[in-house]
Image (cartoon, rainbow, N blue to C red):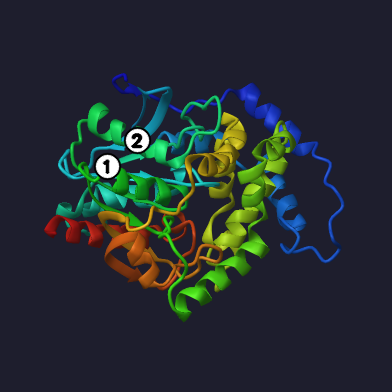
Amino acid sequence: MTAPKPFEVSWADADVADVLRRVADYPFPVAPIEGGWGCGCDPQFLREFCAHWTGGYDWRAAVAELNRFPQFTARVEDFDLHFVHVVGEADGKRPLLLTHGWPGSHYEFWGAAERLAFPSRFGGDPADAFDLVIPSLPGFGFSSKPARPFGQRGTARLFNTLMTQVLGYDRYLAQGGDWGALVTSWLGHDHGDHVRAIHLNMLGLRPAGPPQGEEEIAWINRTTAAGDMMGAYLRLQVSKPQSIAWMGAGNPVGQAAWILERFHDWSDLRTKGLTEVYSLDQLLTNVMIYVMTGSFTTGAWYYRALIEEGGVVLPEGTRCETPTAFANFPGEALYQAPPRSLAGRAYNISRWTDLPTGGHFAAMEEPVMFADEVRAWGREADGA
C-alpha cells in the first residue's frame, strides 16, 4: 500500500492521431437496409458518431475536462487504483464513495460531482456536502489491469482499504450503479464496520431460494425475457470475454459500437433521443477512456470474474444488513427493480425512492435528480 500520488490524464498526440486514422479508415460492414438499433448499433448513428469523432471532437478539451477534479493513484494490493478525490464543503467530515459500472467510467459522475461536493454553489445547504472519492474499477480506465479476471467482491475489499487505510476515512457512505451497485453491495455486506449506509440504483444481490408469490414470479419472467432480448453481451462476456477482446483490439469503431448499443438500450429514451440525453462529446469521452487505456478487454473480463467469485446469490438466511437505499429510475430496461419483498430478503432496505425519469446510467442521465436523491439519502443516513 502506498500514499496517494497526484495524477493527470495525458494523451499523446501520436496516439490520438492513430485512433483517429483507424476511425477514418474503418471499413463499415453491410447492415440491414432498414437500419435502426434492432440488430445492434444503428449504422447511420455510428457513421455520424465517427464523423464527429474525426471532425468535431475536441479531444484536448476532453482531457482538460477529465482533469477538472483532483485525482490520484495509490497502490492497494496488486493494483494501482486511480481515483478522483474532491474534498468539498464537508471538509473531510462526510466521505462518499461513488462507484461506476460497465460500459461507463468514473466520468459518469461528472455532472453530479460538484453538486454533491459544493451544494451551496447551486443554492443548496452546505450541510449536505460530501467529500467524494470516485475510483476507476480495477482494469478500467486509469486503474491498472489485473493479470486475470478480478471481480466485484475483491474490488469491494480494495476500495474499503483505499477509503480506510489510504485516505483515513474510518466510516463512510457508498453509492453505485451497474457493477458499482454490486461492489457497493459487497461493501455493505462484508465491510459494514466501516460502511455506514449504501445507496444503489441497481439491486445486484439475490436471496437464496425460489421466488415467493405471483409478483416475484412475474418479475423473474419479465427479467428473463428482457435478458433474452438484450443480454447476449452478458452471456459472451461471462463465458468467453476474450472473444470480444480479439474483435475489439485495435478497432476503436467496434469498441464504440459495442458500448453505444448499451447506452441506447439502457437509457431512458421514452421521451428523448439518445443525443438529447447525452451529448456526442459525452459519449465520445466515455468511449475514449476505454480506447486510450486499452481497458475494453479487461472491462469484459470483469463479467467472467463474477462467475469465478461465486455469483450474486447469497447463502440461505443471509442478507446485506447495512442500511440500504434504492433509487428506482423507471427507464431501466434490462435490470428493472425486483419486488420489494424479494429485495428485502437480500438487503436491509431503509429507503426506496421511485424517480420520474432516468435509466441505467442515472448519474449521467439525470445528474441534478441524482444529486438531489443522494443528498436526501445522506440526510437520512446521518439521522439514523
Would you say 280 lies left or right of 348 here? right
Residue 172 versus residue 210 in the image, above or below:
above
Amino acid type, callout 2: Arg
Pinpoint residue 85: horizontal percent, then vertical percent.
31, 35
Residue extending furthest toward the top:
2
Pinpoint residue 345: horizontal percent, then vertical percent.
34, 64
Tell me if mark 2 has few (under 14), some (14-19) or many (20+) residues whose alpha carbon lies within 10 angstroms of its own: some
Which numbered tag is attached to residue 213? Answer: none
Residue 309 versus residue 49 in the image, above or below:
above
Which quarter shows the C terminus? Answer: bottom left
Q: Earlier in the sequence, mark 2 or mark 1?
A: 2
Tell me if mark 1 has few (under 14), some (14-19) or many (20+) residues whose alpha carbon lies within 10 angstroms of its own: some
Would you say 218 lies left or right of 72 here? right
Mark 2 and 1 residues: CB-CB less than 8 Å, in contact?
Answer: yes
Q: State the image quarter where residue 68 is shown.
A: top left
Q: Secondary structure at mark 2?
A: helix
| Residue 135 visible to the viewer | no
What residue sits 27% from the left and 66% below the top? Answer: 351
Which numbered tag is attached to residue 157? Answer: 2
Q: Which residue is mark 1?
A: 191
Pinpoint residue 231: horizontal percent, then vertical percent.
63, 57
Residue 34 versus residue 96 in the image, above or below:
below
Residue 197 versus residue 12 in the image, above or below:
below
Using the numbered discs, state the Cα–Cα distance from disc 2 to disc 1 in whole angstroms.
Answer: 8 Å
Pinpoint residue 338: horizontal percent, then vertical percent.
44, 68
Amino acid type, callout 1: His
Q: Nearer the viewer, residue 369 or 342?
A: 342
Which quarter shows the N terminus? Answer: top left
What residue sits 36% from the left and 46% below the top? Answer: 186
Q: Nearer the viewer, residue 307 or 122?
A: 307
Would you say 321 lies left or right of 272 here? left
Residue extending furthest toward the left:
383
